[in-house]
Amino acid sequence: MLNRIRAVLIDLSGTLHIDDTAIPGAVEALKRLRSSGIKVRFVTNTTKESSRSLHARLSSLGFEVDRKEMFSSLAAARLLAEERGLRPLLLVDQAAEEEFEGLPAPEQGPPNAVLVGLAPKRFDYQSLNQAFRLVLDGAQLIAINKSRYYQTKDGLSLGAGSFVAAIEFATGKEAEVVGKPARSFFEASLKGLGVAAEEAIMIGDDVKDDVIGAIDAGIQGLLVKTGKYRPGDEKKLAEGVVVAENFPEAVDRILRAKESN
């Protein structure tokens, strides 16, 4: 069952696209959703690339997306760092570093925080050991997201959460999560839309971070069977939560619900 919907939060990787390939029918489905008058915002835990790079990727795939409509865990991490005056050690991919330009540089003082995103080329012993020592000495441990895995063209791959867990295990300290499924992330993603949480719905392929996280924040959730979806994920959801084969079907379900409300 879907209640009245005035805004849709849309996950990106695994929901609209996988790497450089759009989910079949997703471009046209987004156009149908926009033409209905429902507000749209794109929310992502992606930390492999900056919002500028991600926007360029989406545009190249044919998606009509305004950068102002995008809200990422990288943006949330940047805001947190600014609010707290952090000097972070960045464990993020080089392509995402531009999101943190202007923050205090290492020469301005030793890092007082460790920000961990998905950085496959930087997750070596030396970097993780440096992070371990900083956290052990009192630096804040902040997970830009704590995703378990993500979908690529050649299959599922380890997410940032696995490496965050390693630092947590070694230091005995729990990371603060700023991306999905943190309630604060979902609340921030709704700012400026002028809709109540219960009037919004989150479409995503991650049953835990996207759907259950949204529901815990008072937002409706809709799971799609693409991307990182695994058979049986729907059994983790409460009765009545909508599950669709893909993004186009999810849009169809939302539009039918809008017509009946």
Image (cartoon, rainbow, N blue to C red):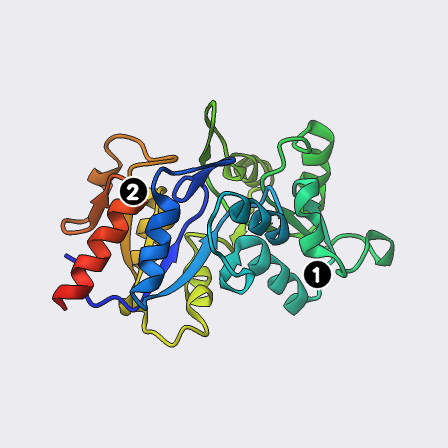
Q: Residue furthest right?
A: 107
**Residue located at (12% from left, 65% from top):** 260
Check disc 1: other Cα within 10 Å, few if <14, some if 14-19, many if 20+: some
Q: Nearer the viewer, residue 134 or 162?
A: 162
**Residue located at (46% from left, 50% from top):** 63
Residue 86's mark? 1
* Quarter residue 68 falls in: bottom right
**Residue located at (87% from left, 54% from top):** 107
Count of numbered badges drawn on the protein = 2
Is label 1 in a helix, a strand or a loop? Answer: loop
Q: Earlier in the sequence, mark 2 or mark 1?
A: 1
Residue 211's mark? none
Tell me the amino acid under the disc marked 2.
Val
**Residue located at (29% from left, 69% from top):** 6
Residue 32 in picture, x, y percent from top left: 31, 56
As measured in the structure, the alpha-carbon distance from the residue carrying label 2 to the one carrying label 1 is 37 Å
Q: Is residue 46 left or right of residue 250?
A: right
Q: Is residue 250 left or right of residue 257?
A: right
Residue 65 in picture, x, y percent from top left: 49, 57
Q: Nearer the viewer, residue 14 or 105?
A: 14
Residue 236 in picture, x, y percent from top left: 24, 41
Is label 2 in a helix, a strand or a loop? Answer: strand
Q: Nearer the viewer, residue 95 or 251?
A: 251
Relative to 95, residue 39 above or below:
below
Check disc 2: other Cα within 10 Å, few if <14, some if 14-19, many if 20+: many
Residue 45 in picture, x, y percent from top left: 50, 48
Tell me the amino acid under the disc marked 1.
Leu
Residue hosting label 2: 224
Quarter of the image that includes the N terminus: bottom left
